[in-house]
Image (cartoon, helix red, strand yellow):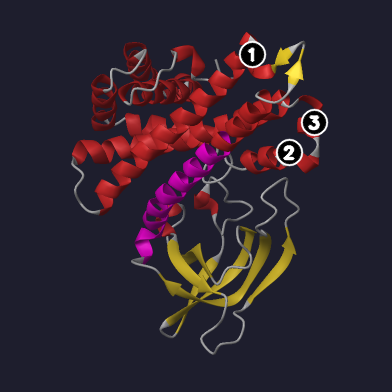
Amino acid sequence: MTERQGGSDVGQNAVVAKRDGDRWRLFGQKFFCSNIGCEVALALARPEGAAPGTRGLALFLVRRDGPDGSRNRYRIDRLKDKLGTRAMATGEVTLEGAHAELVGAAERGFAQMTAMLNITRLHNAITAAGIMRRAVMLASAYAGQREAFGRKLEAHPLHREVLGQMAAEADGALYLTMRMAQLLGRIEVSAADAAELALFRVGIALAKLYTAKQAVAVASEAIECFGGQGYMEDTGLPRLLRDAQVLPIWEGTTSVLALDVLRVLSKGDALDALGAELERLHAPERGDVLDLARKVRLEGGDTGESMARRLAFSLARSWMGGLLGGAGVEVRPRDIGLPLR
């Protein structure tokens, strides 16, 4: 659950948590409840008297049903009329003294939510990779059947070039996402060393922001590959594009995550870990992108911030190229970056 004034700036959250004996009650409005039909939701709220900003937020579990089995004390004000992902209802909620359970220590609410966001950002990247793969499969199958100008679409060099770029994005998304899954797995079983922890902190933001942005581009390209028929609802392609569009917004927009990358790289261990990873993979253009990272760190301030997206995209492309090359997947550097070059 997120709030109208909160959004990315979570520190502005205004929902209040009040003690009720040994329990808690929540009061206020949540502008987005992502899955309105859920049985359990997690929500940040500020206990009475707590500090302002993210430091004063605690994490609560809100059940659909109250302790006595009746419906919990919240009101669904309305459902959202969304661009896509309509199969999952999203709504606005007013908490009217809803029973809630404190999760962990009250002063660690935001930190605990951040750990959860790492998992949902991985889920976001998995979805992006899946959407890209489906778009490539549909466009490639169509190209093998549709004839234009005396031959199949797949026989035209320019169309093959476009399909190749789309496939490179889909492959790169899969490999970068699975690298994040591997690192998270090692972290969760306490097998990761300090370098892997630092690498995951920067990598999960890069993977989420880049794959999400490219899922929209690849889905759009797939529609164009079908021509006018791709614009028709009964092909399912318009829904693919609509559903992809939520991915750059969900769990941190592209700019918010680019700034997160900047913040993480301001610590020397993260940049060192990423540099070692790119060197190990013999990633393309690694020298240039690492020099850019150092330059952005050195610039700092508004100038450094203005370069955050450029840096994030460059790092993600280089990393993906290294992972693909290490796996024996032939890919040209120019194939990664559609249409962000």
Task: Answer whether residue 48 is visible to the viewer in this image.
Answer: no
> Few, some or many C-alpha atoms within 10 Å of disc 2 (few <14, some 14-19, many ≥20)?
some
User: Residue flagged by tag 2: what amino acid is it?
Assistant: Pro
The disc, 3 or 1, on the residue closer to the chain's N-terminal end is: 1
Q: Quadrant of residue 248?
A: top right
Q: Which mark is residue 238?
A: 2
> Few, some or many C-alpha atoms within 10 Å of disc 3 (few <14, some 14-19, many ≥20)?
few
Q: Secondary structure at mark 3?
A: helix
For disc 3, the marked residue is: 229
Q: Are marks 3 and 2 in contact (CB under 8 Å)?
A: no
Q: Position of residue 54 (x, y in %)?
A: 44, 53
Note whether 101 is above or below 269 in the view shown.
below
Q: What span is in magenta?
A: 106-132
> How far is disc 3 from disc 2 in space, using C-alphas?
10 Å
> How far is disc 1 from disc 2 in space, using C-alphas?
26 Å
User: Residue flagged by tag 3: what amino acid is it?
Assistant: Gln
The disc, 1 or 2, on the residue closer to the chain's N-terminal end is: 1
The disc, 3 or 2, on the residue closer to the chain's N-terminal end is: 3
Q: Secondary structure at mark 1?
A: helix
